[in-house]
Amino acid sequence: MLSLPMSRVKNEVLPARRAILFLPVIVLAIASGTQAATHQVPEDFATIQEAIDAAQTGDIVIVAPGTYIETLRFPGRDITLTSTDPLDPEVVAATILSLPVEGGRRTGIQPLRNSVVLFNQGETPASVLTGFTIRDGFGTRVPELENPQVPLEVYMGGGVLCQDASPTITRNHFRNNIGAVESDSEQGLGGGVACFGSEALIINNIFTENRSYMGGAMITFASNPLIANNLFVDNSALLVGGVYLRSGRFLNNTLVGNHADQSIGHLLVVPFDEQSSVLVQNNIFSQCPAGGGILSGEMGPGAWFAYNDVWGNEPMDFIDVSFFERGTFQPDARNWVGTFGNISEDPKYSDSRNQDFRLRDDSPCINAGDPDLEIDLMDSDLDGRARIFARRVDMGAYELAMLIGPQADAGRDQDVFTGTRVTLDGSGSVFPDPNNLTRLHLWDQLEGPSAELSDPRSVQPTFDALQEGQYRFELIVYDGIHVSQPDEMVVTVTRRTRGGG
């Protein structure tokens, strides 16, 4: 159980269990033949919970700036709870959902044992929470995670708990939610957000200075959420200061300065069970001051962990899985960097001292994400700009909306028979300045049987595929000023079978 020492965390057994924001409820209202009603707080209702209770499927509750001291429970109906403008950071900062501050741990008084917002009535992604600062939460007790033999109460989701519910949580700021950290009778999981039996969409949020026993910013159990385009800064825990991921998609997030008292500053990945799916791509994990960067408890390097930048974490970027048994830090000897698009370089934030974690124009994270990323539900970055600019997504929560240098495009992979004359095609490469006629293509073979390219500096060189095998090529383009990131393609050559066409 969760009360066991860290040496047994790996073996714990738990029961399995501005228009786009409003789009789900609008569609639902149209489909049901009803017109969405709007409820204003405090104009129409004195409290947010009163407005939530009155709202019907498809309705929108709009909250004016102010501080609202309430514990909110969504009703199981698909409604939208929003500030007056989720895209305006000043509005988000001024529209605060909080538990009583006087009950906060910082005053030394017993904290109120609740999440600020609770979803546990089967809500769907058409239930939307957007545009708030959510703070001072503690967590909701979840008896399903408790061991009857151990007198330990488990609390999840200081800011928000999604239990058997899958809402959309977007453009909120989770700040200073503090759960039970070190106690003989209580344990807090997921200071900012916790998912238990949930497929929540957690997109374009900011998490700062949340704290709990495990998963200072977030934790997922028996869930398959989409966690994308979020910024995690200075969250902490006894174990796993940032995110404890048991399952789900973790895409294009930026994690800076998260730390743990004992171990794992940014991310712990331990699949919930054999059926759990985990995908960690296009993220930046940087500058953890204590606890180490990342530990993968079950899964070694592979396509599930790809196109990430892991850099500058103390005492090491990747922690060896032997930590579970020995309780001591050793660097992971497995090859995480240099494969599957992963790098370990200074991401070059615009102004990290002033909490600006957008990328500079010389960042190695620009156009370095998964070239085949499917946008899905994350079509804008944390600033609300287009998620992909200049053909390929950037790593992290922010997209740099300017074309700095040329972008190489080596074309599609090809499957051919022996004896075929193969044409490589770099014509899809992008050059930012149409008036600059310097456009140099540089092809290089990385693997496979030796291939003699007709002209390695041409846009479309050819070669004769004389032997079976996989020929892997890399293309770099140059405009006389900037050199692009490399792009790769593979030609698979097989022998034509007798009787084949």
Image (cartoon, rainbow, N blue to C red):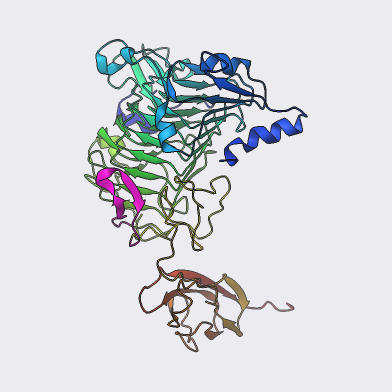
Asked if residue 465 lies in the magenta stretch, the reply is no
Residue 409 vertical placement versus 106 (above, below): below
The reply to whether residue 297 is in sight is no
Identified at 22% across, 44% down, the residue is: 314
Measured as percent of width and height from the top left, residue 416 is found at 62, 76
| Residue 412 appears left or right of 455 | right
Identified at 48% across, 87% down, the residue is: 452
| Residue 388 appears left or right of 295 | right
Residue 65 vertical placement versus 203 (above, below): above
- Give the residues drawn in magenta, as a range: 344-362
The reply to whether residue 195 is in sight is yes
Q: How many marks?
A: 0
Residue 17 vertical placement versus 382 (above, below): above
Of the 4 image quadrants, the one containing the C terminus is bottom right
Instruction: Please state which of residues 260 and 48 is positioned toward the viewer in this rendering.
Output: 48
Identified at 29% across, 49% down, the residue is: 332
Measured as percent of width and height from the top left, residue 184 is found at 29, 14
Identified at 39% across, 21% down, the residue is: 137
Measured as percent of width and height from the top left, residue 121 is found at 59, 20
Instruction: Please state which of residues 433 and 170 is positioned toward the viewer in this rendering.
Output: 433
| Residue 387 appears left or right of 254 | right
Instruction: Please state which of residues 310 and 99 is positioned toward the viewer in this rendering.
Output: 99
| Residue 148 appears left or right of 317 | right
Measured as percent of width and height from the top left, residue 198 is found at 54, 30
Q: Quadrant of residue 246?
A: top left
Furthest-front residue in this view: 43
Residue 258 vertical placement versus 428 (above, below): above
Instruction: Please state which of residues 366 and 493 is positioned toward the viewer in this rendering.
Output: 366
Of the 4 image quadrants, the one containing the N terminus is top left
Furthest-right residue in this view: 33
